[in-house]
Image: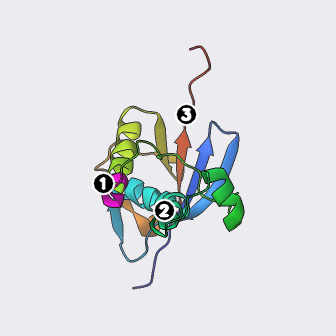
Amino acid sequence: MGSFFMLLIDEIAGQDVRQVGHAPAGKLTMTVRELLHARVELEWHDRIKPAEDLHAGGRAAPESHEARLNRGTEGGVRGFFVGGDCAVPERRRERMCAAAEQAFLDQRIFVLLDDRQAESLDQVIEVDRTGAATFLLLTPLQGG
């Protein structure tokens, strides 16, 4: 049995499309909930963890835009689920996962599995039969 990879893509209202990484390999199936958590992990390691490491070293962390520029990842993982400060790193990650799940339930984020829309957090995805998962972020119109 070989490794299976599912490409993860962020998209904002059809305008800004960006490949952000791959779902964890080694599992033939995963739920939409696990996929959302994998997407949060990408954001955690790209955006949040480096800033927390700077704080732990006694230095002030630069703003996230500056940090991405300094790391050379301006085109990297966008901050879909960043929000709500929490001093304890694991609690912050849990909050980000909860925010991702709630955004899915509130239909602020749609998950497209190739050409099919994910319908529930507990829907099982066959990783070996799904080439890409797109996280489509809907942005409300200003004033509406």
Residue 102, which numbered label? none
Q: Give the secondary structure at mark 2.
A: helix
Q: Residue at x 46, y 57 (%)?
A: 39
Q: Which residue is mark 1?
A: 91
The residue pinned by badge 2 equals 55
Q: CA distance from mark 2 to mark 3?
A: 32 Å
Residue 64: x, y in percent?
60, 52
- Going by the numbered disc 1, the residue's amino acid type is Arg
Q: Quadrant of the C terminus?
A: top right
**Main secondary structure of the magenta stretch:** helix
Q: Mark 1 or mark 3: which comes first in sequence?
A: 1
Q: Which residue is mark 3?
A: 138
Could you say where residue 43 lies in the image, as x and y percent from the top left? 50, 57
Please report the residue visible at 66 percent of the width from the left and 39 percent of the height from the top: 14
Q: Nearer the viewer, mark 1 or mark 2?
A: 2
Bounds of the magenta segment: 87-92
Density class for disc 1 (Cα within 10 Å; few <14, some 14-19, many ≥20) is few
